[in-house]
Image: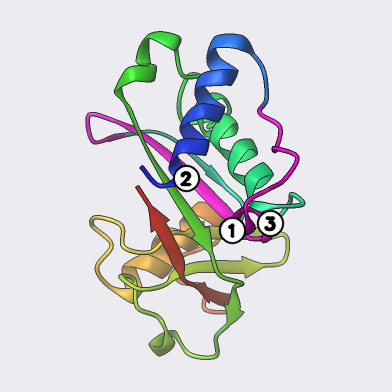
Amino acid sequence: MHPFVALAKNAVEEYITRRKVLHPPEELPVDMKQKAGVFVCLKIGGELRGCIGTFLPSADNLHDEIVRNAVAAATEDPRFCPLLETELEAVRYTVDVLSTPERIKDPAELDPKKYGVVVVKGARRGLLLPDLEGVDTVEDQLKITKMKAGIDPSDDNVEIFKFSVERYK
């Protein structure tokens, strides 16, 4: 198990069983010192059970970003009830570390298998991770992302950003 995934798992288990938030060790490993947006997704039996993330870093380091988002995925995803202690053993985790989003000029720059997308219009913002089952075309990717943001899917007057992820399982 990759250290990022182990950290997410430990953070969720510590919070669900003891209501404690993991703090970083005194000396963080080098790969945990960087700042990046992170999504943590939880699945049980192949079905999504929670997924929360940040597309820009909101914490001082990757350790804290993973911990915050792992706990939020387990307890604050509005699509699901908070994770139960009895479910912990069945949970499988993924941690996606995002590159800095870059604005695109043309949807031809997108590839739903390779890049995630952020769509922005005014205060509305939607994000979709890359390489999701059932999202095979740029058109599908943009339509779903706009809908998540509450933007009319036919509205082409939006800012579009792409990002890549390193996915850890």
For the record, the magenta segment spans 22-47
Residue type, label 2: Pro
Tags 1 and 2 in contact by the CB under 8 Å rule? yes
Query: Helix or strand or loop: what does disc 2 sit on?
Result: helix
Q: Which mark is residue 13?
A: none
Q: Which mark is residue 31?
A: 1
Foreground pick, 4 / 59: 4
Coordinates of residue 116 in the picture (x, y in percent): 45, 67
Tags 1 and 3 in contact by the CB under 8 Å rule? yes
Pick whichever of labels 1 and 2 is earlier in the sequence. Answer: 2
Coordinates of residue 118 in the picture (x, y in percent): 55, 67
Residue type, label 1: Asp
Alpha-carbon span between mark 1 and mark 3: 6 Å
4 displayed left or right of 102: left
Coordinates of residue 135 in the picture (x, y in percent): 28, 62
Coordinates of residue 37 in the picture (x, y in percent): 61, 57
Q: Which residue is mark 2?
A: 3
For the point 32% across and 67% down, which residue is it? 140
Q: Which residue is mark 3?
A: 33
Residue type, label 3: Lys
